[in-house]
Image (cartoon, rainbow, N blue to C red):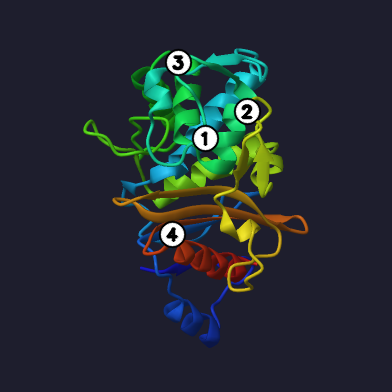
Amino acid sequence: MWAWIFAGEEKDSVFRRWDRAFFTLQARAAVLVDAQTGEVLYEQDADTPYPVASMSKMMTEYLLLEAIREGRVSWDDLVHVSENAATAEGARVSLAAGEAYPLSDLYEAMAVGSANNAAVAIGEHLAGSTADFAEEMNRKAEELGLLSSRFVNATGLVYSYGQNQMTARDVGQLAFRLVNDFPEIIQLTSETRVQLSSTKEKVSNTNLMLLTNNESLRVQGLDGLKTGFTDEAGYCFTGTAKRGERRLISVIMGADTEVARFTETKKLLEKGF
């Protein structure tokens, strides 16, 4: 059930075997990934698909950053917000249907504040509709080797037509590709707060590990990456931290409380470092 890889060790010591057997996380599923090699260092129920909530926005971020790199869209694009986008539930920023906002503002609102209305607007801007963007998400998932993932929208919200599902292993692989293919995202996810240029709204980061002075939550070098919550998914968090030349990526799925997703992240990252 539990797996821990100790790089460079040919044999487990008695202490290592005891330590591995008694290391537990209070979460439905988890993985720890070496961000340089992609090696999975730890896994817990890593191959069962679960609702992934807003951690699925990492795919929306990936597709947006890819479109920026390829010149198909620009940060200065004015995105007209549809009624569908403006009325998205859950975490949100102030967007009015029929108004236009810079794409860069929507990206910041999504990546830092997990704004669902901003994510829907981005998906519609890139693909024309929520359904068409979901198709793009699924095509990219297949291309990235995320073979157990299924996307139905840009946000991770639950609708009558379904919800996004991923395995912890797939979430870790998506985060691995995101931080390696587009390392500039860390400059944004490490910000505790951003101010949107168009509305002057201040958006706080949903990653409380960046904001707290509580030592039970703080991790040296932590600078991302994406939170998630729905009733079906529980409390989720994909974290990443860098110390020296080493970066790790952690995934916690289905914790019982908001704080637990961060305390379990700390356990996992500190174990890896």
* Distance Cα–Cα, label 2 vs label 1: 10 Å
Amino acid tagged 4: Ala
Q: Quadrant of residue 156?
A: top left
Indicate the amino acid at tag 2: Thr
Q: Residues within 10 Å of mark 2 (few under 14, many from 20)?
A: few
In the image, taking residue 21 as reference, residue 61 lies left or right, namely right
Residue placed most toward the observer, 121 or 268: 121
**Measuring 78% from the left and 59% from the top, which residue is drawn there?**
244
Marks 2/1 in contact by CB < 8 Å: the verdict is yes
Q: List the single residue furthest toward the right.
A: 244
Nearest the camera: 160 or 184?
A: 160
Viewer-side residue, 212 vs 67: 212
Element on which disc 1 rests: loop
Residue 127 got which mark?
3
Q: Which mark is residue 30?
A: 4
Amino acid under disc 3: Ala
Give the class, few, some or many, for how many residues have Cα within 10 Å of label 1's Cα (few <14, many ≥20). Answer: many
Total number of numbered discs in the rendering: 4
Q: Counting residues from the N terminus, which is met first, the one under dot 2 or under dot 1?
A: 1
Mark 3: few, some, or many residues within 10 Å (few <14, many ≥20)? some
Q: Decide: few, some or many residues near mark 4? Use Cα within 10 Å; few <14, some 14-19, many ≥20.
A: many
Residue drawn 43% across and 54% down?
236
Mark nearest the camera among 3 and 1 is: 1
Residue at screen point 52% across, 87% down: 14
Q: Which residue is mark 1?
A: 93
As drawn, 142 above or below 83? below
Residue on which the image places disc 2: 199
Mark found first going from the N terminus, 3 or 1: 1
Tell me the CA gap for discs 4 and 1: 30 Å
Question: Marks 3 and 1, how far apart in space?
Answer: 22 Å
